[in-house]
Image (spheres, rainbow, N blue to C red):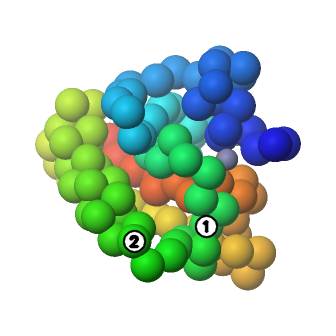
Amino acid sequence: MNCIFCKIVAGEIPAKKVHEDEEFLAFHDIRPAAPVHLLVIPKRHVPSLADVQPGDEAMLGRLMALVPRLAHENGLEGGFKTAINTGRDGGQEVDHLHIHILGGRR
Ligand code: 5GP
Ligand code: ZN
């Protein structure tokens, strides 16, 4: 499959990883829009939030619960923004579900 984030999961493309477990991977965005800009993805290829199926609720809950933990581990004590871009009109460029975490002093 020609998915850049699946290639990162497979280790075929390098990334600055900050977290990896059986289900999720988090790494620095290659074009950071804030002092700290992380992306959190499920390892399984889910194209977007619009493609979430019944049965994905628990995965989404674990994904969302991972966000504040990663924010803390990456020094975002002053807070952070999260974003999920979905679909063409939602500004999604990479068609593999991901949460942006943006923060750091500005
Ligand atoms: P989207 O617009 O789909 O929500 O965001 C995709 C994000 O992925 C963008 O912020 C972009 O900079 C980032 N990105 C695209 N290709 C790569 C890559 O190969 N490595 C990393 N680390 N980030 C990428
Ligand atoms: Zn993928």
Instruction: Please count the marks in the image.
Output: 2
Q: Nearer the viewer, mark 2 or mark 1?
A: 2
Q: Is residue 96 above or below residue 10?
A: below
- The image quadrant where one finds the N terminus is top right
Instruction: Report x, y in % for residue 49.
Output: 54, 72
Secondary structure of residue under mark 2: loop
Q: Tag 1: residue type?
A: Ser
**Nearer to me, 4 or 90:** 4
Secondary structure of residue under mark 1: loop
> Which residue bears the numbered disc 1?
48
Residue at point 43% right, 78% down?
Answer: 54
> Which residue bears the numbered disc 2?
55
Instruction: Report x, y in % for residue 24.
Output: 41, 40
**Nearer to me, 75 or 42:** 42
Mark 1: give few (<14), some (14-19) or many (20+) Cα within 10 Å: some
Image check: 17 left or right of 30? left
**Nearer to me, 34 or 14:** 14
| Label 2 CB-ligand 2 distance < 8 A | no
| Any part of residue 104 in sight | yes
Q: Tag 2: residue type?
A: Gly
Residue at point 40% right, 50% down?
Answer: 101
User: Which of the marked residues, 2 or 1, is nearer the chain's N terminus?
Assistant: 1
Instruction: Report x, y in % for residue 98.
Output: 52, 54
Q: Is residue 90 above or below residue 97?
A: below
Quarter of the displayed picture in which ligand 1 can be seen: top right
